[in-house]
Amino acid sequence: MEKKIIINIGRQFGGGGLAVAMELGKKLGIPVYDRELITKAAQDSGFSAELFVQSDEKRRIFSLSSIFTSIYSSPTENYMSDKGLFEIQCATIKKIAEQGSAIIVGRCSDYVLRELDCTLNVFLTSPLSERITRICERHNLAEEKAESLILQKDKAREEYYNYYTFGNWGVASTYALCIDSSILGIEGTADFIIDFAKKSGKLK
């Protein structure tokens, strides 16, 4: 590609976000970062990857008892607040963006890289019934449990995004492009995003 592009993908749980990201990466020949961000953040910081997994796109609410327990417990080298972990992850995202074109899934990357001109912010969704079917197949769950998991994950992502960005997760005005991935399918959605990127001048 003649021009660097960073495609930031927000997504509903079960909306095909990672699958579309991987298809985009294959078609454009650029790296995709999802869970890899957690590993890279841990490597960059020296903290355990497990800490990042525990706070991954979740805003944890601490009770008074947990706060006092933290105060009076002996500190460990692997202790860090969620805000601290978020800041380390932000630094990792910025470092990835500096290295060249990339596709980044979630982790508030659209907000973190908001000052760059080379970004394209996309949000992927699909009807709840489609997402339930996908999650049932992926995790071998009954429909009721799949729906409960979807609602739980979406709520956590929304709270996490809105808290750290002061924005609105999943609201059309936050993104350049919002797509129902069930209409064109995974490959068709990836092709549509590429076509949009070209027509908008983000991709050459």
Image (cartoon, rainbow, N blue to C red):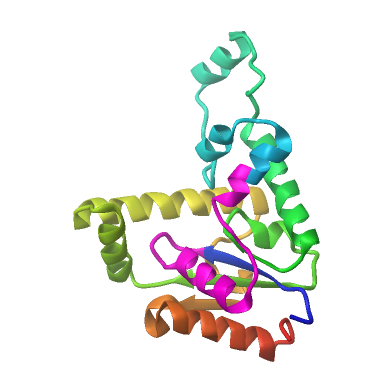
Above/below status of 58 relative to 191: above
Dividing the picture into quadrants, the one containing residue 122 is bottom right
> Is residue 150 found inside the magenta-colored segment of the image?
no
Q: Nearer the viewer, residue 152 or 52?
A: 52
Q: Position of residue 75 (x, y in %)?
A: 64, 14
Image side of residue 85 versus residue 20, left or right: right
Rendered-image quadrant of the N terminus: bottom right
Q: Nearer the viewer, residue 101 or 130?
A: 101
Q: Position of residue 4 (x, y in %)?
A: 77, 74
- Residue in view at x 77 percent, y 53 percent: 95
Dividing the picture into quadrants, the one containing residue 27 is bottom right
Q: Nearer the viewer, residue 26 or 181?
A: 26
Rendered-image quadrant of the C terminus: bottom right
Above/below status of 163 relative to 188: above
Dividing the picture into quadrants, the one containing residue 167 is bottom right
Residue furthest bottom as drawn: 199
Image side of residue 95 versus residue 107, left or right: right
- Residue in view at x 63 percent, y 16 percent: 76
Image side of residue 85 versus residue 105, left or right: right
Q: Nearer the viewer, residue 172 or 118?
A: 118
Above/below status of 40 relative to 137: above
- Residue in view at x 57 percent, y 81 percent: 193
> Is residue 17 found inside the magenta-colored segment of the image?
yes
Above/below status of 39 relative to 96: above
Q: Position of residue 159 (x, y in %)?
A: 52, 49
Image side of residue 115 versus residue 133, left or right: right
Q: Position of residue 115 (x, y in %)?
A: 80, 64
Figure disc tally: 0
Magenta stretch in the rendered image: 11-39
